[in-house]
Image: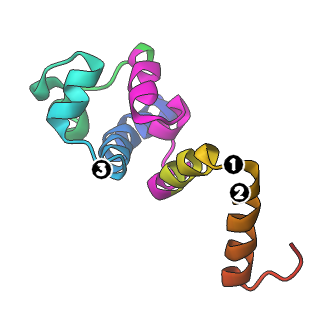
Amino acid sequence: MSRAYGAVRRDVPHRLREIRHARGLTIEQLAELVGLTYQTVQRYETGDRSLRVEDLPRFAAVLKCRPGDLVDDDSADPDELVARDLFRKLSREDRKRLLAAMNAWAGDDAA
């Protein structure tokens, strides 16, 4: 087994569970949305079964993330994924106001 494959196999269960939690989904809900059984999704999350590469886009679409977010533990934090989705729903003016507030909270006067 290649080192890269081992990393993917190790990271996917953790990321799948983490992103599912951030989206507020139960295993049952995720299983229904991707068209699998509860047991199959549970096995993916525990690492007892490996998620196939060709299934990553389907899970990513349901979890509203990129397939790479499920594979890479250094990818975006699940809270950042939720924030990104919410940000995209805002009007341009609301985005500017939110960014200004975030810059003020972060103490970034340059923005």
Please indicate whether residue 43 sits to the left or right of residue 56 in the image.
left
Identified at 20% across, 18% down, the residue is 36
Q: Amino acid at mark 3?
A: His
- Please identify the residue farthest to the right as the structure is shown: 110
Q: Amino acid at mark 2?
A: Arg
Task: Please name the residue that numbered disc 2 is placed on.
Answer: 95
Q: Amino acid at mark 1?
A: Ser
User: Residue 91 — which label?
Assistant: 1
| Magenta span contains residue 82 | no
What segment is highlighted magenta in the picture?
55-79
Question: Picture quarter containing residue 109?
Answer: bottom right
| Magenta span contains residue 56 | yes
Q: As rendered, which of 60 and 5 lies closer to the eye?
A: 60
Task: Please name the residue that numbered disc 3 is placed on.
Answer: 21
Q: Earlier in the sequence, mark 2 or mark 3?
A: 3
Q: Residues within 10 Å of mark 3 (few under 14, many from 20)?
A: some
Q: Earlier in the sequence, mark 3 or mark 1?
A: 3
User: Mark 2 near mark 1, Cβ–Cβ under 8 Å?
Assistant: yes
Question: Picture quarter containing residue 105?
Answer: bottom right
**Depicted 29 relative to depicted 100: above or below:** above
Identified at 31% across, 40% down, the residue is 13
